[in-house]
Image (spheres, helix red, strand yellow):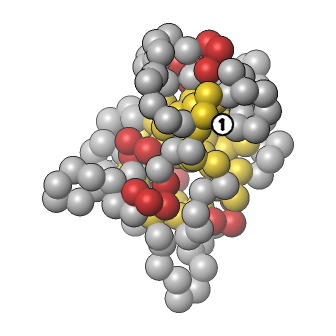
């Protein structure tokens, strides 16, 4: 998918080495810390900052001299074959996933563009609003965000 004509992304991100880049053209429809066991196992972390976007608002932006699959690899979870997780073939970092059932891309907060101070740019747009799948957390988080058994609004912890 190409960027909307004449528009500038409100968010940008990349893999660690910068080979894979993307732009996002609207605020997330979900921004939360995810504690689900799939995210834990796929990232080897106790939780991640996940952001979900409509397909039309997400665009791969690296220079197109190379075909996509020469720099981008993916993994399809056999338990959820409608989800495809993309990673850079050069540095191995997961950069996004696509859910064919919802028509949404997900990215992770750590991959978003940062300023010289190390802060994520446009943090006010992407800061998490909740903890989801908190029942399977690996550690307790003491903050003011809501803790949910599933997605935000689907059963408070």
User: Residue most toward the left?
Assistant: 116
Q: Residue furthest right?
A: 101
Q: For residue 94, say whether it is visible.
A: yes
Q: Residues within 10 Å of mark 1 (few under 14, many from 20)?
A: some
Residue matched to label 1: 84
The residue lying at 55 percent from left, 15 percent from top is 137
Report the number of discs. 1
Task: Tell me if residue 70 comes above or below residue 47 in the rendering.
Answer: below
The residue closer to the viewer here, 73 or 50, is: 50
Q: Quadrant of residue 15?
A: top left
Q: Is residue 36 visible?
A: no
Above or below — where is 117 with respect to 10? above
Work out whether residue 80 or residue 141 is closer to the camera in this orientation and state it.
141
Task: Please give the name of the residue rendered at 48% of the width and 72% of the height, measured from the top-left corner.
Answer: 9
Q: Residue at x 79, y 33 (%)?
A: 154
Dot 1: element: strand
Give percent across and percent down for residue 157.
68, 21
Residue sitting at the far front: 144
């Amino acid at each position: 998918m190409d960027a909307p004509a004449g528009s500038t992304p409100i968010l940008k991100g990349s893999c660690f080495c910068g080979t894979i880049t993307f732009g996002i053209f609207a605020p997330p429809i979900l921004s939360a810390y995810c504690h689900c066991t799939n995210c834990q196992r796929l990232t080897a972390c106790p939780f991640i900052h996940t952001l979900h976007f409509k397909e039309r608002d997400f665009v791969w932006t690296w220079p197109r001299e190379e075909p996509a699959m020469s720099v981008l690899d993916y993994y399809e979870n056999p338990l959820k074959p409608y989800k495809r997780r993309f990673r850079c073939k050069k540095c191995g970092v997961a950069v996004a996933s696509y859910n064919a059932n919802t028509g949404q891309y997900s990215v992770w907060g750590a991959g978003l563009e940062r300023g010289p101070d190390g802060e994520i740019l446009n943090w006010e747009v992407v800061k998490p609003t909740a903890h989801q799948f908190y029942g399977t957390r690996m550690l307790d988080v003491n903050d003011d965000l809501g803790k949910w058994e599933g997605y935000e609004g689907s059963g408070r912890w």
